[in-house]
Amino acid sequence: MKYWMMAAALGVGAMACAEAEMPEAPEGEAIFAENCALCHGAGGRGDGAIAAGLRPRPSDLTQISRRAGGAFPVAEVLSQIDGYERDAIAGVDMPEFGALLEGDLVPVDTGDGVMTPTPRPLAALLAYLESIQR
């Protein structure tokens, strides 16, 4: 693809992202129920239906901010979910959810003031996880 065509395509994608509305927690809650609750539990506390048989047990996702010193670590959570940078835990493989990486892009502030184009389902899940912090 010629440079100018690629630049034009990227510009259109950036404009679409800038115009998109950030999803809210209820949209992410539905995604969580479908993809995460089996291990992490309906409330995200690591007590899902199959959690007892897993070693180590799934994380309590309501404690993410607390474990990070009080602030919700957006970039780290996104990296953990999308598989870019997962903690290596012997014998445990968190599934990769390809569908969360598809769809319209929305701008997400990853904590450094930079708005990062993020697939809407992934941003919705992020909004939900942030909403359940205790």
Image (cartoon, helix red, strand yellow):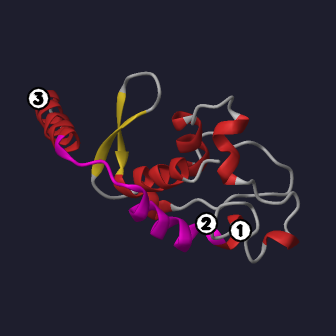
Which range of residues does the magenta coloring cover? 19-37
Tag 2, which secondary structure? loop
Q: Are marks 1 and 2 in contact (CB under 8 Å)?
A: yes
Tag 1, which secondary structure? helix
Q: Which of 83 and 64 is in front in this view?
A: 64
Report the disc number at residue 36. 2
Q: Which amino acid does label 1 sit on?
A: Cys
Residue under circle 1?
A: 39
Residue under circle 3?
A: 4
Closer to the observer: label 1 or label 3? Answer: 1
Q: In this view, does 84 lie above or below 30?
A: above
- Disc 2 crowd rating (10 Å Cα; few below 14, some 14-19, many 20+) is many
Q: What residue type is labelled 2?
A: Cys
Residue depicted at 13% across the width and 40% down the height? 12
In three-dimensional space, the C-alpha distance between marks 1 and 2, rounded to whole angstroms, equals 6 Å
Residue depicted at 46% across the width and 70% down the height? 30
